Each structure stands twice: as C-alpha cells, then as structure tokens.
Image (cartoon, grey):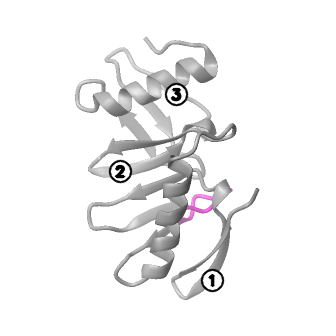
C-alpha cells in the first residue's frame, strides 16, 4: 500500500511515495534528509521553516519503526553524529573488512555507512543479525 505525501522543498511541490523511500537521516541541528526514490536527489526538511512536512516525516517513521513488516526491516543506526533510519531490506550489499568494519551504501544515494564494532556496537549488532537472518551468511 502506498503512503503518498506532498512535500514543499525549494519552492517546488513533490508528491512522494514514502514506502519507496528507504533511508532518512536526522542531523544534530534537527534537519531530516531523505533521498527521492530512484534518484540520488536529497530532500532536506528543516523543522523551523517547514514544520508541517517535518511532522509528516516523523509520523511516518514512528509508524514504520514500530511495525514488523514482511517487506521492511527498519532500524535506527547512529553514524557520523547523525541518526539514520534505514530499511535494511533495501540494502543490496554489505562489505565486511578484516578490521571488523561493515560498510553498506544507502539506497537511492551514494552515501556509504561504515559501522565499527568497537565505536558503534549496537548498530553493528543490528546489521550483523539482519545479514544472518536475511541471507544465511555470517559476517565474520
């Protein structure tokens, strides 16, 4: 089922199916970034200048992160001083390095997420468990 939302960004109106958006990023300053489906175009929503659209995003994320869905596995991952909410089912590849780090790339974007087991053990464990459950392969 589609979850269409109208967003105003840079004096343009976008109608976006949030079920096709696979990653959101909360920044320390309160902004939320997401990438349009099938492109690498970021949409950055600031709560101070666009509270209505900001609230739409928060409402959607609250809804999907609280549910277990067959087609989605939403997790919160802390990386580079930001909080990412990512649907891991939409990640196409994971790279496990000899030093233990795991790298994957956000869908519809070019941003790599690099998770270190020492500095970010909680997020690291979420990804390791997901990979094992989804693929049957162990990252070790």
On residue 94, the disc is: 3
Crowd class of label 3 (few under 14; some 14 to 19; many from 20; radius 10 Å): some
Foreground residue among 67 and 81: 67
Residue designated by label 1: 13
Across and down, in percent, residue 18 comes to 63, 61
Question: Dot 1 lies on which element?
Answer: strand
On residue 83, the disc is: 2
Which of the image's four quarters has the C terminus?
top left
On residue 87, the disc is: none
How far apart, in angstroms, are the residues tagged by discs 2 and 3? 19 Å
Across and down, in percent, residue 128 comes to 45, 22
Q: Main secondary structure of the magenta part?
A: loop
User: Going from the N terminus, do you reach mark 2 or mark 1 first?
Assistant: 1
- Asked if residue 102 can be seen in this view, the reply is no
Query: Which residue is found at the position 44% from the left and 82% from the top?
Result: 50
Q: Which residues are magenta?
A: 35-42
Crowd class of label 1 (few under 14; some 14 to 19; many from 20; radius 10 Å): few
Q: Is residue 114 above or below residue 76?
A: above
């Amino acid at each position: 089922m589609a979850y269409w939302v109208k967003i105003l960004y840079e004096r343009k109106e976008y109608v976006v199916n949030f079920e096709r958006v696979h990653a959101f990023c909360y920044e320390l300053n309160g902004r939320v970034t997401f990438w349009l489906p099938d492109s690498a175009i970021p949409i950055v929503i600031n709560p101070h200048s666009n509270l209505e659209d900001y609230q739409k995003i928060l409402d959607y994320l609250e809804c999907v992160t609280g549910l277990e869905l067959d087609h989605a596995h939403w997790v919160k991952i802390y990386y580079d001083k930001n909080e990412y909410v990512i649907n891991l089912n939409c990640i196409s590849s994971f790279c496990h390095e000899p030093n233990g780090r795991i790298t994957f790339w956000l869908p519809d974007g070019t941003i790599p997420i690099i998770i270190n087991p020492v500095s970010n053990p909680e997020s690291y464990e979420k990804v390791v468990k997901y990979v094992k459950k989804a693929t049957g392969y162990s990252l070790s």
